[in-house]
Image: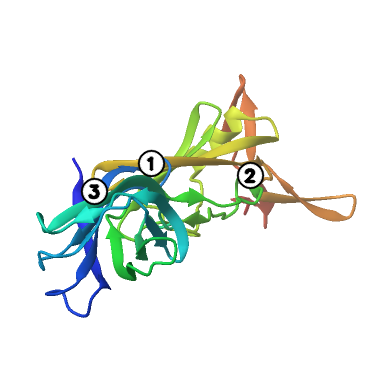
Amino acid sequence: MSTLVATYSVLVRGTTTANGITCQTQIYKVSQDTATNTTTYQAVVKLLCTNDASYHLDDNGVVTIRVAGVTSLSATSCTGFDFRSSTSVTIYTGSTTVTHDTDGTFSEIFSTICKYDSTGSYANGTGSGTVAFDTIPRASEIGTISNFNLEDTFSVPIDKKSSSFTDDLVIKQGETVIKTITDYASGANINLTDAELLNAYNAIDKTAAFTFETTTKSGSTTIGTDSAEATGIAAGTAYIKTGGSWKRALPYLKVNGVWEKAIANIKSGGSWKRGIG
């Protein structure tokens, strides 16, 4: 069902609305498409007159509708009019689609140029008004994620289209869910727990592609989803000196095909103590 969202007018003949002719434009919202971030609108252009005398029987009207200065709809050979027997005539009806801003909003200046005969000598004028359509909900988009060490702090850049929406983040390796974060904020630090690390180790060898999935919500309503990949590296949290250089090592052992956390101990002062990994 179409909804009237804006009306604007301009006097195209005469000096007042009482003795002249007014061109009125009505803009209706027909439909909106969330996937394409667009609105289909309908424009209805009318001539209004109450002087009981004006008429122009030639069908040579020209109507041009512009959005932000760019032609959006146009027509020639629009119907003539005879106000000796009426006070209103629709000279043009047309529909087209406009694209919203990336945040889903739309507010632009619409203008209608209306004239009759080739020079516009009988009727001529340009009316304009601001047209705002309902904001289209937009899902957040994940930016480029840098490759990361599983044991270190990392983050995910998110381009949020609406500050009122929330983004739930899921980190997966293949079909294995490694971590879930509710209401994740773009760039916030992420650290895997010991249990999550072991889960990740069991899903990969040394490196693997990890999938990051966001679900954008408005309350409990899902607006949309997005996903991106980055390479995760099992770098280790302990250090050993080999070949004269300190290198990272994994304080984990693979037992019966499953990675388990190992306990590193050193003998100090005649007593065994837990090492720092």
Q: Tell me, yes or no, whether the two marked residues, 1 and 2, touch with CB atoms within 8 Å.
A: no
Task: Estimate the x, y position of residue 73 in percent, counting from the top left.
Answer: 41, 52
- Label 1 sits on what residue type? Gly
SS class, disc 3: loop
Alpha-carbon distance for marks 3 and 1? 13 Å
SS class, disc 1: strand
- Label 2 sits on what residue type? Ala
Dot 2 corresponds to which residue?
264
Residue toward you, 265 or 156: 156
Residue 117: quarter of image: bottom left
Q: Is residue 182 left or right of residue 24?
A: right
Residue 64: quarter of image: bottom left
Q: Residue at x 10, y 55 (%)?
A: 86
- Of the image marks 3 and 1, the number of the one nearer the N terminus: 3
Indicate which label's residue lies in the foreground, 3 or 1: 1
- Is any part of residue 181 visible from this angle? yes
Q: Quadrant of the N terminus?
A: top left
Residue toward you, 133 or 167: 133
Residue toward you, 117 or 24: 117
Assess disc 2: are there few (<14), some (14-19) or many (≥20) residues with their C-alpha within 10 Å of its C-alpha. Answer: few
SS class, disc 2: loop
Dot 3 corresponds to which residue?
219
Dot 1 corresponds to which residue?
224
Q: Is residue 267 left or right of residue 97?
A: right
- Label 3 sits on what residue type? Gly
Q: Residue at x 39, y 47 (%)?
A: 97
Task: Estimate the x, y position of residue 85 in percent, counting from the top left.
Answer: 9, 54
Alpha-carbon distance for marks 1 and 2? 46 Å
- Is any part of residue 138 visible from this angle? no
- Of the image marks 3 and 2, the number of the one nearer the N terminus: 3
Q: Give the colouring mode of the picture.
A: rainbow
Q: Is residue 117 above or below residue 97?
A: below
